[in-house]
Amino acid sequence: MSEQLGAESAIAVWPKRDEEAFERGKKELDKLSFDALSFSSDDLVHLTLEMFTALGFPSKVNVSLLKLKKFVLCVRTCMFDNPYHNWFHAFDVMQTTYCLAINSGMTKTLLDIELFALIVSALCHDLEHPG
């Protein structure tokens, strides 16, 4: 069953999770060989949230899980359907940044708010890019 995110949200439905795709993706999130195009748009929504929660967010930055879910859906909605600058690209840049942060030890040297800003910036870097 899909999860309702509240009447005040323009984006009201959290997608149902494909457990097989989620588990497959979760095992690969820390690898540069991760292939975002082998997943659905909804799969990437769940894997985006997984990266945030694996890093201890949203609790480390005092953001509710509901707000983070709404944010992820809003980013997906605001990414245009361009051949390159699209939701899959946004996810790919976030996942690459996550992978580099995890594997370099950067997660141990940055403040929580700095790491959160880095990951959010990676996800949003091309938000509403026209081409």
Image (tube, rainbow, N blue to C red):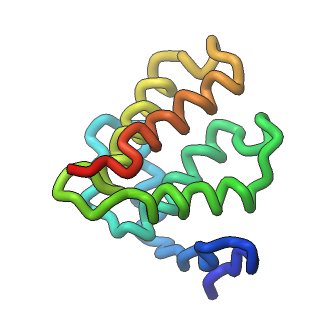
Asked if one can make out residue 23 in the rendered structure from this viewpoint, the answer is no
Looking at this rendering, what residue extends furthest in the top direction? Answer: 109
Seen at 47% across and 75% down, the residue is 18
Pick the front one: 26 or 69:
69
Q: Where residue 81 sits: x, y (%)?
A: 27, 64
Looking at this rendering, what residue extends furthest in the left direction? Answer: 83
Relative to 59, does residue 71 appear above or below in the rendering?
below
Q: Where residue 37 sits: x, y (%)?
A: 25, 58
Seen at 36% across and 37% down, the residue is 31
Seen at 72% across and 57% down, the residue is 67
Q: Quadrant of the N terminus?
A: bottom right
Relative to 61, does residue 43 appear above or below in the rendering?
below
Pick the front one: 52 or 29:
52
Pick the front one: 60 or 130:
130
Please give the count of numbered marks on the rendered protein: 0
The quarter of the displayed image where residue 117 is located = top right
Looking at this rendering, what residue extends furthest in the bottom direction? Answer: 1
Seen at 64% across and 22% down, the residue is 114
Asked if one can make out residue 42 in the rendered structure from this viewpoint, the answer is yes
Q: Where residue 49 sits: x, y (%)?
A: 58, 54
Relative to 30, does residue 89 appear above or below in the rendering?
below
Relative to 16, does residue 53 appear above or below in the rendering?
above
Pick the front one: 1 or 129:
129
Q: Where residue 22 sits: x, y (%)?
A: 47, 64
Residue 99 shown left or right of residue 32 in the figure: right
